[in-house]
Amino acid sequence: MKKTRRIALLGLLVAVCFVLSYIEFLIPFTSLGVPGIKIGLANVCVMAALWLLGPVDAAAVNLARIFLSWLVFGSFTGFLYSLAGGALSLALMILLKKSGRFSPVGISAAAGAAHNCGQLFVAAVLTNTAALWYYLPVLLLCGLAAGAVNGIILTALLSRLHRGEGTDNVEKS
């Protein structure tokens, strides 16, 4: 992929991440009774970067998403939660994709669960409360479900892109 096209795609992915993060910010997930539950739609852009551009660019989109969301919507502890969850989920996505054994839906579901584990670990460390781990089963189920939905969205997006709609040099998944 040419450098200008790559940079434009990176900019587009970061912008879409930011818009999706804003939309999620407006949705009151706390009414579900479990802190930390979100759909994680912005992660579709991170996964798209992984499939279309590679791990380094996916990490750049992920960091930009986390940093911009923190600056506009969040607190420093929220930044730490997102950073831990984002790093753990991206590392798992890279490993599972590299193995070639998992579909985007499976990778995304596992990454959603890993994201919640990373956040829960930071919360337990910051509060020095091991009792937070009782949230783990619920967070794992929610992470798996949200990740699967995001994986389905990614699969549809990649399928559309691979049909030749302007992506002549995009890496095939």
Image: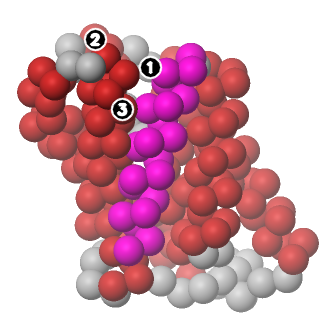
Amino acid type of the residue that numbered disc 3 sits on in the rendered structure: Val
At x 49%, y 24%, the residue is 78
Q: Is residue 5 left or right of residue 130?
A: right
Q: Which residue is mark 2?
A: 31
Quarter of the figure with the N terminus: bottom right
Coordinates of residue 48 in the picture (x, y in percent): 55, 64
Amino acid type of the residue that numbered disc 2 sits on in the rendered structure: Ser
Asked which quadrant contains residue 141, the reply is top left
Q: Are marks 3 and 2 in contact (CB under 8 Å)?
A: no
Amino acid type of the residue that numbered disc 1 sits on in the rendered structure: Ile
Q: Secondary structure at mark 1?
A: loop
Let me know if residue 87 is in the magenta part: yes
Residue 161 appears in the rendering: no
Q: Are marks 1 and 3 in contact (CB under 8 Å)?
A: no
Q: Which residue is mark 1?
A: 27
At x 63%, y 48%, the residue is 63
Please report the bounds of the magenta region as a residue range.
75-95
Residue 55 appears in the rendering: yes
Q: Secondary structure at mark 3?
A: helix
Coordinates of residue 152 in the picture (x, y in percent): 35, 60
Single out the mark in the foreground, 1 or 3: 3
Please give the label number shown on residue 152: none
At x 14%, y 30%, the residue is 133
Q: How many marks?
A: 3
Q: Which residue is mark 3?
A: 122
Disc 3 or 2, which lies upstream in sequence? 2
